[in-house]
Image (cartoon, coloured by chain):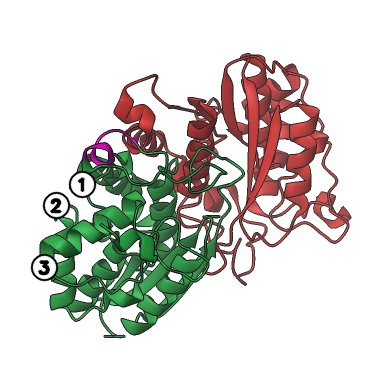
Chain colours: A green, B red
Amino acid sequence: MNETGKKAVVLVSGGLDSATVLAVAREQGFACHALTIQYGQRHAAEIAAARRVASALGAVRHVVSDIDLRAFGGSALTADIAVPKGRSMDEISHGIPITYVPARNTIFLAFALAWAEALGARDIFIGVNAVDYSGYPDCRPEYIAAFERMANLATKAGVEGDTRFSIRTPLIAMTKAEIIRLGVKLGLDYGLTVSCYDPGANGEACGTCDACILRRKGFAEAGLRDPARYVAAALTP
Amino acid sequence: MNETGKKAVVLVSGGLDSATVLAVAREQGFACHALTIQYGQRHAAEIAAARRVASALGAVRHVVSDIDLRAFGGSALTADIAVPKGRSMDEISHGIPITYVPARNTIFLAFALAWAEALGARDIFIGVNAVDYSGYPDCRPEYIAAFERMANLATKAGVEGDTRFSIRTPLIAMTKAEIIRLGVKLGLDYGLTVSCYDPGANGEACGTCDACILRRKGFAEAGLRDPARYVAAALTP
């Protein structure tokens, strides 16, 4: 990692997409400051994955910020609502899923903006994707553009007119298969990442939640082997 | 408090302005859900004040969310930098003070948005003020408008086209004296509130930080007695 490069804050969740984003930011020569938000999700496996990813990709620093969205409720990822399983691609692609977390990316980007301003960084990377979009409003390009505009009014940088903040979304128009091919080309080991919304006690991915279905489809379409460990039942046709 | 009224989320810090906003929201008939963000500030006196204010004004619910902005640094309110004292009104009114917390209102509003969406509330109240502005970029009307626009793209409400979110800033164009007169008219006891950035061990306000200076000037201009307790030295002419 280039410690003397231009600083960037990179949101790293421990999943496949954000690990690829970190690899892209590193490739572009940024001194990457990895930020993971632990938001009361029901398992900590992805935090452990985020630590592995940040370390393997040489982040200059990795901060894990704890916030508690459970007090607000409203999502299968933060409240006691079952994660849906075995949905078809048609079901996954339409409507807003129950795993939607209200204002999640807005909170994540707000924290990233705070750190970026304190660091003097002007580039914030986030692994949102509008193709395998799955109905999340806060993954759309028009949302990202509106956040960027707001960020430049919210901050000293905006008032004092120095270089503007950029919200960088290198994956926003890519299919999952394209993302995986890009990461592999950049030398990323996807065995470090965790995508599953509902992993088993030993950390195996369930194979049947929306995130697992999108990941498995991506590897299949890329013609590559998925190094994730799945529960045996998920692999039975 | 009208528990069956239209729900609103009201950001309550424990200070004079946000207490007035809560009184305004109550007066307008909202079922108020008070939200306090504890962000690693150096004293907890304002959290205690927020609890008193939410309780006295009959909030339906009060959530205190802990976040840690100290990991990011960059402000006298979150890092080990001395709070400035005894500045003139000219110094207070110009430039961005060292007590500026990077992206603070963006983080606060992002949490309020998450809770509002989970509750089904569409109104978010915040006590920003662009008159006694003190150089904070995230108190300006153009910032609030940009946040509101972003919020309506970030959320299910934006995608599904139901009622839009409103960020309500009833104090934004008022002087401190006008705010105080409004609160007194609504029956608010400002003795419940804490404004000081640097209170003493017994909770007395220092009287000389920017927040104390603005508050004392406001009460003086309103021709009202400030019920806050100040350290004796602050009251010597």
- Residue at horizontal 54%, vertical 56%? A42
Residue pointed to by mark 2? A173
Name the outermost residue toward the front: A236
- Which label sits on residue A223? 3
Q: Which of label 3 and label 2 is nearer to you?
A: 3
Percent position of residue B9, x then y: 57, 31
| Residue A87 falls in image quadrant | top left
Residue pointed to by mark 1? A130
Q: Label 1 is found on which chain of the structure?
A: A
Q: Earlier in the sequence, mark 3 or mark 1?
A: 1
Q: Is residue B46 visible?
A: yes
Distance of label 3 from label 2 (alpha carbons): 20 Å
User: 10 Å neighbourhood of mark 1: few (<14), some, or many (≥20)?
Assistant: some
Q: Earlier in the sequence, mark 3 or mark 2?
A: 2
Left or right placement of residue A153 versus residue B121 in this view: left
Q: Judge by depth and name the residue closer to the eye, B200 or B144.
A: B144
Q: Earlier in the sequence, mark 1 or mark 2?
A: 1
Residues rendered magenta in the picture: A90-96
Q: Judge by depth and name the residue closer to the eye, A41 or B116.
A: A41
Q: Amino acid at mark 2?
A: Ala
- Residue at horizontal 24%, vertical 70%? A226
Left or right placement of residue B199 versus residue B110 in this view: right
Q: Amino acid at mark 3?
A: Gly
Please check the rendered image and state whether residue A91 is part of the magenta-colored stretch, yes or no: yes
Q: Label 2 is found on which chain of the structure?
A: A
Q: Quadrant of the C terminus of chain A?
A: bottom left
Percent position of residue B164, x then y: 39, 23
Percent position of residue B120, x then y: 51, 26
